[in-house]
């Protein structure tokens, strides 16, 4: 069994003459020991790897690490729009290289071991013999948190990968060969990197290769035209380089020690004996070769030591949420989802606190008295929808990371004067053209996560909600002037060059209303009454586009009329990545008002229709392998705008339906194989769908994304007998949150009662403050009753 761990001594194979009784006892103990599994053992990184994003599959990385070495099957193909699935696909049968950097809009520093004839082009999936790629079999592939290995069948080379935070560590076991090579294919586009603008590689010592690559990702080109992404590396082999050279495309420059420009690459060659191993430590940086070298010398470890440390770190982090009971499939989904939630949005600052600034220069994070950076800087995908998964998870169990996330955005605000929704080396990569960073900052503040300049944070959040003059494209909210001045955004069917600025009036109004509510609470807490009143009024702007007659969110034109030819299922006309069926429930801060407007009976019936209908399509895109497969369906769990909807029954008299549907989605939308993982090829944005599973299966969630002045979390139906969440004592007074479920079984999805610290709850909700003070929630479950006629 992958990752199986046996206890020493007691569970060893003892070959001595003992009595039959003693043997029987030892067998019982052995079975008991070997059947015990830790969270680490339940992670399967290959789940959902069919049609997965560039940053999705990096098993050898550390949590939130910069170094993310991983196999690539088609990474050099790139992608047209900057977001399509590329990199590693479980359906592919050959590996083209091992790429050390996998981040949103960032990729590069590819390496590949080969033997025999020197080839310097990767080749295509359908023509593996035409390049340096190699076939492989799944039987010879191992993927675990912090470790990856595979046998390259064409070369009989075993490749192994692990990492420290900023150093990728490779180990290649070669066969006997007169011509063993390691390629450094640096000047070639990789994944979401976009076009390579420039590159440099050099031999820097008897056993060292160094260099850099500059790329122009599609989102950087769109949101911060003229900016680039730089990645630097310093790679040290554990043996001297015998022969070497440079290459560009098919042209090889034997003996050259320097090359520059697009396509630049290097190779080293040596003789190897059978099973001879070569280790390479690859220091990485986004600021300079010097800092890449410093990161390598500061953090670098021999392969076995690095693997052991990475494995232990993953075990420690995954153990912060310990679940007992539940099925094996539920544990696998849970810990694989948690693994993905901790994998994305990686480190971007160096060990000395240097970080890449928005203008391309190098900034410096303040150092404490011990000379250690006070916080880390991280790259980030857009935060769109993450308040329904990632940030709630961070707030509970990783507040230190949430705090650094806020600090990262405040650094960019200080450097540029604006918050950026997504950051690639501080460059703006908004992604969806909106900006929820102010909301995320406010939610952190509400939860007591405040180890940053609070006044600066409020200033940034207020500017993000209310200002538009000289607003850069990458700061998103390009139509916020209309919203603030007029209280609504007029619909237009003209997409223009930047559709995010013109085409999504209705979904933007809902989003801006929500974020206005969030920042209003922070302004109120900090005594900014004027801004509080203004934002509070804007938070109700959604009501203007709610059509009382139809009960749908309905865009209005420039004179205030509801637009004609309106179709609730139509996506991309007033609604971004969704439709009115989905977005009409996107009032997470005013759910009670929405229920009143629809009427509770109609509200519940519409939710019933939505879930009963969508279940037949696997709650979204069915089995179609495409990120946008469910955009024009009635409900789409594979994309962010729908992720809170199953929790809305808690605001009616039928909370049992939240319990039923959240568990059913966990059971049916989520799978345990490469194709059926997060839906079927759905867009798992850096751990968001995995984090949703985690929150739903422990039974805690906040529809409002922790944006209320005194945030609460709604209670659902946990999948497990017991959940233990360790709390960070630097942020919270309590030691842990314990959630116990009596009478838990797969058929018992519904709750009969709930207690908090021994006291009966009159509703399925608990204050966030009570949770982090240390809490025990006791739930009693009952056999699921039939909620619907003809229920599946």
Image (cartoon, grey):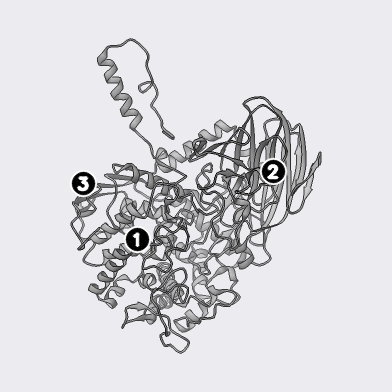
Q: Of 499 and 275, which appears nearest the observer?
A: 275
Q: Which of 311 and 485 is in front in this view?
A: 311
- SS class of the residue under badge 3? strand
Mark 3 or 1, closer to the camera: 3
The CA span between labels 2 and 3 is 56 Å
Compared with residue 486, is residue 775 higher up or lower down, i.e. above or below? above
- The residue drawn where x is 21% and y is 66% is 653
- Helix, strand or loop at label 1? It is loop
Q: Which of marks 2 and 3 is nearer the N terminus?
A: 2
Of residue 499 and residue 752, the one placed in the foreground of this image is 499
Residue 529 in the image: state x and y as whole percent: 42, 74
Instruction: Tell me the CA gap for discs 3 and 1.
Output: 23 Å
Image quadrant in which you'd find residue 280: top right
Relative height, residue 392 to residue 128 (above, below): below
Residue that appears at 70% across and 34% down: 116
Task: Tell me the mark number nearer the camera, choosing from 2 and 3.
Answer: 2
Can see residue 445? no
* Disc sitting over residue 184 in the figure: 2
**Residue 517 visible in image:** yes
Counting residues from the N terminus, which is met first, the one under dot 1 or under dot 2?
Answer: 2
Residue 276 coordinates in the image, percent (x, y): 64, 27
- Residue that carries the numbered disc 1 in the rendered image: 702
How far across and how far down the image is residue 419, in percent? 55, 66
Labelled disc at residue 742: 3
- Label 2 neighbour load within 10 Å: few <14, some 14-19, many 20+: many
| Distance CA(mark 1)–CA(mark 2) | 47 Å
Q: Is mark 2 on a helix, strand or loop?
A: strand
């Amino acid at each position: 069994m992958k990752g199986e761990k046996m206890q020493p001594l007691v569970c060893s194979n003892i070959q001595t003459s003992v009595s039959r009784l003693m043997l029987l006892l030892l067998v019982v103990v052995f079975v008991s020991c070997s059947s015990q599994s830790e969270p680490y053992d339940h992670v399967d990184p290959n789940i959902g790897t069919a049609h997965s994003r560039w940053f999705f599959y990096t098993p050898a990385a550390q949590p939130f690490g910069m170094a993310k070495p991983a196999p690539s099957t088609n990474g050099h193909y790139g992608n047209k729009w900057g977001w399509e699935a590329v990199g590693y696909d479980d359906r592919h049968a050959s590996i083209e290289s091992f790429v050390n950097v996998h981040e949103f809009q960032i990729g590069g520093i590819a390496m590949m071991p080969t033997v025999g004839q020197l080839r310097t082009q990767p080749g295509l999936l359908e023509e593996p013999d035409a390049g340096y790629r190699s076939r492989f079999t799944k039987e010879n592939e191992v993927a675990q948190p912090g470790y990856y290995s595979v046998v390259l069948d064409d070369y009989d080379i075993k490749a192994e990968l692990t990492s420290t935070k900023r150093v990728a560590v490779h180990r290649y076991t070669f066969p006997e060969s007169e011509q063993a090579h390691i390629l450094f294919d640096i000047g070639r586009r990789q994944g979401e990197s976009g076009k390579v603008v420039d590159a440099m590689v050099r031999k820097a010592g008897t056993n060292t290769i160094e260099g850099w690559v500059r790329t122009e990702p599609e989102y950087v080109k769109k949101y911060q035209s003229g900016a680039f992404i730089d990645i630097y590396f310093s790679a040290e082999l554990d043996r001297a380089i015998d022969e070497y050279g440079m290459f560009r495309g098919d042209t090889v420059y034997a003996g050259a020690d320097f090359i520059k420009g697009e396509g630049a690459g290097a190779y080293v060659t040596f003789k190897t004996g059978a099973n001879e191993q070569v280790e390479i430590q690859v220091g990485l940086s986004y600021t300079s070769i010097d800092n890449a070298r410093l990161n390598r010398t500061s953090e670098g470890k021999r392969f076995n030591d690095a693997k052991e440390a990475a494995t232990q770190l993953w075990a420690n982090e995954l153990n912060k949420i310990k679940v007992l009971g539940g099925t094996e499939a539920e544990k696998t989904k849970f810990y694989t989802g948690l693994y993905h939630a901790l994998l994305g949005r990686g480190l971007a600052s160096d060990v000395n606190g240097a970080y890449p600034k928005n203008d391309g220069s190098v900034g410096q994070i303040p150092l404490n008295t011990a000379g250690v950076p006070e916080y880390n800087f991280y790259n980030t995908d857009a935060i769109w929808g993450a308040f329904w998964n990632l940030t709630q998870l961070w707030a509970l169990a990783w507040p230190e990371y949430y705090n650094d996330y806020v600090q990262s955005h405040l650094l960019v605000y200080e450097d540029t004067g604006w918050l950026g929704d997504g950051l690639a080396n501080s460059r703006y990569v908004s992604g969806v053209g909106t900006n929820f960073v102010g909301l995320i900052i406010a939610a952190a503040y509400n939860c007591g996560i405040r180890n940053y300049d609070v006044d600066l944070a409020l200033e940034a959040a207020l500017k993000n909600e209310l200002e538009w003059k000289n607003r850069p494209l990458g700061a998103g909210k390009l139509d916020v002037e209309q919203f603030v001045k007029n209280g609504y955004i007029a619909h237009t069917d003209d997409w223009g060059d930047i559709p995010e600025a013109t085409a999504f009036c209705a979904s933007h109004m809902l989003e801006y209303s929500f974020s206005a509510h969030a920042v209003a609470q922070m302004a109120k807490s900090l005594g900014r009454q004027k801004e509080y009143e203004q934002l509070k009024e804007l938070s109700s702007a959604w009501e203007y586009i709610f059509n009382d007659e139809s009960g749908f969110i309905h865009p209005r034109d420039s004179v205030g009329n509801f637009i004609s030819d309106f179709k609730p299922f139509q996506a991309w006309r007033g609604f971004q990545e969704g439709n009115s069926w989905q977005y009409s429930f996107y009032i997470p801060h005013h759910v009670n008002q929405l229920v009143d407007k629809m009427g509770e009976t109609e509200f519940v019936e519409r939710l019933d229709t939505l879930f009963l209908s969508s279940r037949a399509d696997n709650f979204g895109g069915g089995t179609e392998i495409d990120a946008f497969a469910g955009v024009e369906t009635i409900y789409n769990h594979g994309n962010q705008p729908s992720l809170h909807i199953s929790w809305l029954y808690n605001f009616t008299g039928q909370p049992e339906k939240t319990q039923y549907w959240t568990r059913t989605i966990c059971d049916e939308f989520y799978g345990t194989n490469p194709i059926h993982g997060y839906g079927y090829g759905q867009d798992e944005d850096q751990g968001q769908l995995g984090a949703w599973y985690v929150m739903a299966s422990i039974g805690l969630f906040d529809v409002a994304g922790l944006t209320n002045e005194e945030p609460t979390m709604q209670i659902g139906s946990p999948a497990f007998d017991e959940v233990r969440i360790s709390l960070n004592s630097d942020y919270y007074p309590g030691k842990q949150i314990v959630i116990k479920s009596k009478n838990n079984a797969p058929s018992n999805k519904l709750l009969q009662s709930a207690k908090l610290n021994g006291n009966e709850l009159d509703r399925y909700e608990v204050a966030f403050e009570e949770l982090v003070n240390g809490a025990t929630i006791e739930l009693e479950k009952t056999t699921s009753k039939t909620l619907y006629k003809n229920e599946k």
